[in-house]
Image (tube, helix red, strand yellow):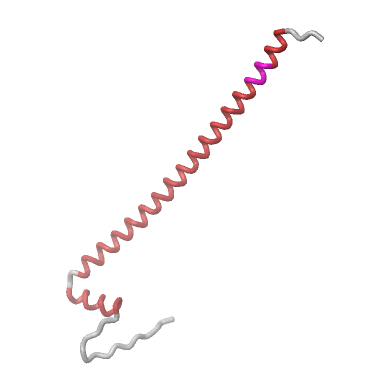
Amino acid sequence: MKISFKTILQKTGLSITIAVILFTLFLIGRTCLTIIRTYAAIHRLKAERETYRQSIAEDSTLIQQLRYDAYLEQYAREQYRMQRRDEQVYIIDEN
């Protein structure tokens, strides 16, 4: 059985071509996964940023309100259950 150089070159060339195509598909697949993960992380971080911005806005409003003594007293009574001397406070659980 005689195998010609041209036949060997064709088979080897085909094998190399298939190997290069598979390697390229592997790299493209990994790149696509990286892109998907990056977009997911960006989306998550944007949502987190909005949560923090909302929290900052609420805290800023609270700070502005706490500058007034009347609201400061009300806040202390509601949040920390503070009371004046000679005063009785009744706590009603609404659950």
**Left or right: residue 47 compared with residue 68:** right
**Left or right: residue 22 compared with residue 1:** left
**Left or right: residue 75 compared with residue 51:** left
**Which residue range is magenta in the image?**
12-16
> Residue 80: where, in percent of width, then height?
29, 78
- The residue shown at (58%, 28%) is 23
Occupied quadrant, residue 66: bottom left
Is residue 15 one of those drawn in magenta?
A: yes
- The residue shown at (17%, 72%) is 68
- The residue shown at (32%, 60%) is 55
Q: Residue furthest right?
A: 1
Is residue 39 one of those drawn in magenta?
A: no
Occupied quadrant, residue 92: bottom left
In the rendered image, the quadrant that contains the C terminus is bottom left
Q: Residue furthest front?
A: 1
In the rendered image, the quadrant that contains the N terminus is top right
Who is closer to the viewer here, 35 or 53? 35
> Residue 63: where, in percent of width, then height?
23, 66
Who is closer to the viewer here, 32 or 15? 15
Who is closer to the viewer here, 7 or 57? 7
Figure label count: 0
Report the magenta stretch's main SS.
helix
Occupied quadrant, residue 81: bottom left
